[in-house]
Image: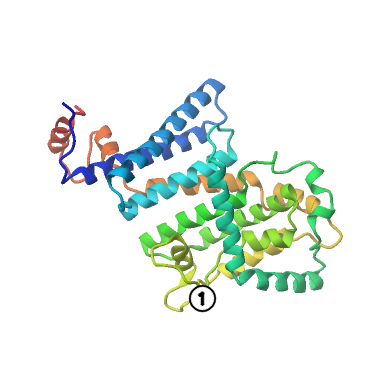
Amino acid sequence: MEKRANPSSQLEVDHAILDYLLYSATKVLIHDFRKGSSEKGDRNKHEDCADTLLQLVDSFLLFFRSLHPGDHGTQELQNRLRLLKFTSLFCSRFASLTIRPSKKIIKRLRDSSTQRRKSSNFGNRLADTIETEGAAQGVNTTDSRDSGMRTSTNIYGPDHPISLIDTLPSFMALSAAQSVLQKQPVSVLWMRLAAGYMAHAALEQSLLRGVRLTDAVKEAFAWSYDPDLSAEQGTDEWAINAMFCDQEEEAEVLGWNDVKYEHIRTIMPPDGRSLQEHANELLAKELPIDALVERLLSFIEGMLKAQPKPLYTQLELGKVDGLSQRQTQALLGTIGMK
């Protein structure tokens, strides 16, 4: 006879299972990425494990939503899902994994980024600033498509189905959710990570896809506080806007504008120099791509460690928060893990 959880506790049990799957999949993806330089046999083994876990997450999410329509889980569980989504994008983008998001997901990410740029007043202000400062400082703002960059040696590697700019919305949603959960504004350290991420995203758009640099910058850096934003509380858009807001001053958080424009000025090539030449020097000295990858991976690992371990993970380790050793052993026996 099939055993099922008591209907009164079914939701709680399914939350615990989903929490465990999300945590495990994220952990394996990170482990796989760290093992990137190991022997091929080990790498394939971990890729298979990560792929299997992601399929389990997808299958269980379908089951969960059919059994509990309308339930979105706790805020902690939603953050766990956001972390897995970004980790999956990160690993797909920077590692030679077989795991790839669908074209539908990539299109949704791009549409989100494009909509953000179109709805933001930042683009117009940025264009004015770049043109004004460029004229005064001798900055080259010409269209990258005229300089043959797409046919030159690619400093970002081969054209990838997932661009850096595609991953920014997921990074912002994850960061904002954590900021709201901890009730803390973003730190200067995070600002510099985010601005460096945006700078690389803008450079990649221009160098790989021939987008005019000023247009690429407008899209990549279109993340700031918008006092006129109309978004429902609890949505990603609302949380991202709140993350950039100083609640006491009801204005953009201090420091973000300076950090943002510092990075924008850094990637604009001086007059008389091509973007390709300028970018080669930047990536060798001031903005190495390897440093960004390592900082993003540390960010992911820090987020995972900051989240409490799932109940089933604690049971696997034989120690549950708030329970004695005897109580833990009794629980293991009750649920058949002993």
The structure residue drawn at horizontal position 81% and vertical position 72%, both measured from the top left corner, is: 135
Q: Can residue 3 be seen in this view?
A: yes
Give above or below for 249 relative to 218: below
Position of 43 with respect to 132 (left or right) is left
Please identify the residue farthest to the right as the structure is shown. 272
Position of 296 with respect to 287 (left or right) is left
The picture places residue 174, in percent across and down from the top left corner, at 45, 54
Position of 307 with respect to 135 (left or right) is left
Question: Which of the pair 29/226 is nearer the observer?
Answer: 226
- For the C terminus, give its image quadrant: top left
The picture places residue 220, in percent across and down from the top left corner, at 62, 59
Residue that label 1 marks? 228
Label 1 SS: loop
The image quadrant that residue 55 belongs to is: top left
Give above or below for 30 relative to 280: above
The structure residue drawn at horizontal position 58% and vertical position 41%, both measured from the top left corner, is: 93
Q: How many marks can you see? A: 1
The structure residue drawn at horizontal position 53% and vertical position 44%, both measured from the top left corner, is: 89
Q: Can residue 285 be seen in this view?
A: no
The picture places residue 148, in percent across and down from the top left corner, at 84, 48
The picture places residue 180, in percent across and down from the top left corner, at 39, 62
**Colour theme:** rainbow
Position of 55 with respect to 206 (left or right) is left
Give the crowd class for mark 1: few <14, some 14-19, many >=20 residues within 10 Å.
few
Question: Which of the pair 237/137 is nearer the observer?
Answer: 237
The structure residue drawn at horizontal position 30% and vertical position 42%, both measured from the top left corner, is: 310
- For the N terminus, give its image quadrant: top left
Please identify the residue farthest to the bottom as the structure is shown. 249
Q: Which amino acid does label 1 sit on?
A: Asp
